[in-house]
Image (tube, rainbow, N blue to C red):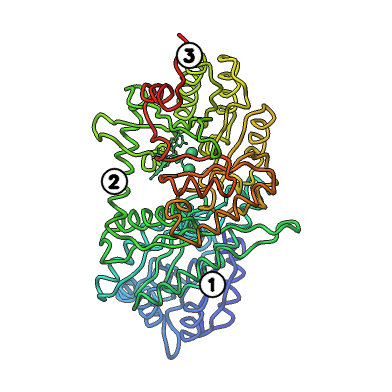
């Protein structure tokens, strides 16, 4: 607590000195004033004055006037004033109380009376300023708690709660002034990879730098919040046209990819951005944020490092996604799945060599849903590991029964999602099924996507190698639709590429694709890889592939994906193979 001060006021210096001596034992610091004017000045300039001892009779500004003027001023109103006077007149005393005095001391001064009075006032002052300090401290603590509750400690940006406060302000401001504002939902792509590879310290550093980069390119009236691990929301006030907004968003994409240095390593990420605009995409904080989030998901699904504006379509897609996920959760226990099989033939002879297992879903409430729609939904619902293993078990059980029944060596191709290379479930199930059916591992092929090979996380490489070491084949499905070049494949233990249907579809008219397919076959063979052409629908296409020396083909021309029993008929009819039994 600061030291208490006592201001003593008397036009006679001798009186002041005497008073000071008397007051010494009280322990407060003494300030002297030799006129009313000086007293007023000191009272307004000094803090922590606990008490004023004021002489009533002074030339020019007397004690009454000093007291009255102190009363008028808010900062000095609460300082207790004790009048010191030789006068005994009642009228004086009354006037003094009216002027604001709290007590009286008669001259000649009785030292013990003075001291005990002064001590009472000093105690009162100490009590009051202690309380004030406590109130002040509580206020500060409350402010700190409020800041913690509304801010992210790492970046010191507003958190989700802070964002909602700001978003509501933004909405009412925009409404009042009649302008549009943008809610930008930004999610970093590949942030997990930075954390996994370089550790959380690097991740933290990246977040802090990204946050400060974002701050640099927004205006003072705009704001940025961090509402999740790698999720930011920016609020842009008063956007005047869509073009400048797009420029801003493109700048954000660039800022997000700026690499940071971590112990000599360059770490970088990119961003997927969704934009919702007040008022056209909503006029409530929750709706705007939700819609911007949905648009961000759309940007992710379009291949990341890009942005999307919200549209009603995005909402429909999101609704459908939820519907699919809810129904998919019940689908396995309800026996709604079956496996279809599509023939894969040797191009030269047209003979059946393999069957690709393709999952089918007939939902009790949604009817038939195509895999291109439900597989991504099952992936995001976390159902793929279990479902993928179910397909594997079912297909191998069926394949084993055919191989027994028809005495043929039929190879099986199984599709695997990238998610299945994140843990050992797929690999363990493969091993288990190989052992169970005494299956030749070379007669099993796991189809992976190009995207998986770009995922350089350590567990992916581990499982790719384990599957290969087990003697099981790996093929790259839908080749040509992703990013990987053929030369890239030589770094991986892949035995086959499946040229995507889109390259075969328009043959022989499409000369450009003709050249591409020719080049892919030649280069793949150069790398020691086998080639399967997907989507072969015509005899010309087959002949063309024969002329290229393409190894295998799959497509409606040879057979559509079909249920187990139809495939058995196919085995019997198309190839003149009859069951042994
Ligand atoms: P995919 O692995 O590329 O399978 C080939 C797709 O092409 C199949 O579609 C098949 O019906 C279709 N197709 C084959 N030949 C022709 C043709 O001549 N013309 C035309 N127009 N289409 C042809 P489907 O069965 O709808 O499967 C779509 C995708 O879903 C598959 O593409 C695969 O990526 C995925 N998928 C299917 N089953 C599974 C599964 O069990 N697990 C996983 N992870 N993905 C699966
Ligand atoms: Mg496939
Ligand atoms: Mg394919």
For the residues labelled 1 and 2, say whether their Cβ atoms are less than 8 Å apart.
no
Residue linked to disc 1 = 216
Residue linked to disc 3 = 405
Residue linked to disc 2 = 319
Residue 558 at x, y = what percent?
43, 37
Q: Is mark 3 within 8 Å of ligand 1?
A: no
Residue 315 at x, y = what percent?
29, 52
Residue plotted at (62% across, 58% down) = 268
Residue plotted at (59% across, 26% down) = 443
Residue 180 at x, y = what percent?
30, 72
Q: Which residue appears farthest toward the top when viewing the image?
A: 581
In 3D space, how far apart are the residues under numbered discs 1 and 3 (Cα atoms)? 71 Å
Compare marks 2 and 3 and give the one earlier in the sequence.
2
Q: Please, what secondary structure does the residue beneath circle 3 have?
A: helix
One can see residue 444 in this view: yes
Instruction: State whether residue 195 is above or below residue 112.
Output: above
Instruction: State whether residue 482 is above or below residue 437.
Output: below
**Quadrant location of the N terminus?**
bottom right
**Quadrant location of the C terminus?**
top left
């Amino acid at each position: 607590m600061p030291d208490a001060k006592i201001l003593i006021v008397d036009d006679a210096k001798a009186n002041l000195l005497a008073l000071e001596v008397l007051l010494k034992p009280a322990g407060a610091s003494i300030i002297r004033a030799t006129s009313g004017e000086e007293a007023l000045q000191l009272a307004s300039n000094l803090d922590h004055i606990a008490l004023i001892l004021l002489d009533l009779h002074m030339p020019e500004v007397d004690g009454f006037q000093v007291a009255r003027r102190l009363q008028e001023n808010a900062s000095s109103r609460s300082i207790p004033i004790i009048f010191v006077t030789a006068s005994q007149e009642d009228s004086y005393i009354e006037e003094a109380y009216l002027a604001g005095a709290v007590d009286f001391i008669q001259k000649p001064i009785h030292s013990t009376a003075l001291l005990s009075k002064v001590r009472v006032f000093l105690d009162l002052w100490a009590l009051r300023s202690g309380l004030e300090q406590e109130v002040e401290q509580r206020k500060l603590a409350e402010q700190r708690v409020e800041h913690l509750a509304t801010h992210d400690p790492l970046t010191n940006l507003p958190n989700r709660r802070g964002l909602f406060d700001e978003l509501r302000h933004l909405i009412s401001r925009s409404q009042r002034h009649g302008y549009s504002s943008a809610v930008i939902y930004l999610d970093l792509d590949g942030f997990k990879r930075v954390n996994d590879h370089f550790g959380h310290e690097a991740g933290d550093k990246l977040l802090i730098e990204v946050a400060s980069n974002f701050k640099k390119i927004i205006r003072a009236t705009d704001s940025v919040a961090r509402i999740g691990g790698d999720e930011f929301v920016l609020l842009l006030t008063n956007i005047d046209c869509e073009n400048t907004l797009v420029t801003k968003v493109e700048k954000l994409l660039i800022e997000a990819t700026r690499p940071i240095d971590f112990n000599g390593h360059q770490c970088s990420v990119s961003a997927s951005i969704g934009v919702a605009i007040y008022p056209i995409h909503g006029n409530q904080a929750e709706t705007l944020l939700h819609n911007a989030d949905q648009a961000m998901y759309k940007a992710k699904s379009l291949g990341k490092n890009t942005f999307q504006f919200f549209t009603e379509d995005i909402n429909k897609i999101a609704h459908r996604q939820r519907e699919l996920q809810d129904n998919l959760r019940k689908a396995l226990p309800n026996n709604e799945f079956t496996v279809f099989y599509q023939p894969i033939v040797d191009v030269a002879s047209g003979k059946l060599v393999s069957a690709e297992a393709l999952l089918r879903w007939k939902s009790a409430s949604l009817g038939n849903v195509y895999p291109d729609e439900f597989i991504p939904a099952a992936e995001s619902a976390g159902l793929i590991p279990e479902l993928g293993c179910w397909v594997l078990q079912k297909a191998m059980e069926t394949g084993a029964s055919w191989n027994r029944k028809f005495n043929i060596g039929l190879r099986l191709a199984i599709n695997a999602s990238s998610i299945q290379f994140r843990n050992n479930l797929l690999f363990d199930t493969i091993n288990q099924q190989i052992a169970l059916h005494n299956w030749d591992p070379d007669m099993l092929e796991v189809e992976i996507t190009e995207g998986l090979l770009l995922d350089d996380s350590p567990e992916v490489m581990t499982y790719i190698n384990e599957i290969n070491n087990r003697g099981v084949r790996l093929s790259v499905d839908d080749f040509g639709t992703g990013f990987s070049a053929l030369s890239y494949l030589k770094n991986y233990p892949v035995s086959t590429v499946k040229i995507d249907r889109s390259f075969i579809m328009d043959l022989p008219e499409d000369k450009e694709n003709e050249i591409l397919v020719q080049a892919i076959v030649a280069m793949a063979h150069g790398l020691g890889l086998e080639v399967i052409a997907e989507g072969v629908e015509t005899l010309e296409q087959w002949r063309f592939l024969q002329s290229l020396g393409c190894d295998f083909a799959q497509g409606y021309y040879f057979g559509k994906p079909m249920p187990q029993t139809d495939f058995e008929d196919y085995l019997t009819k198309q190839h003149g193979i009859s069951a042994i039994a």
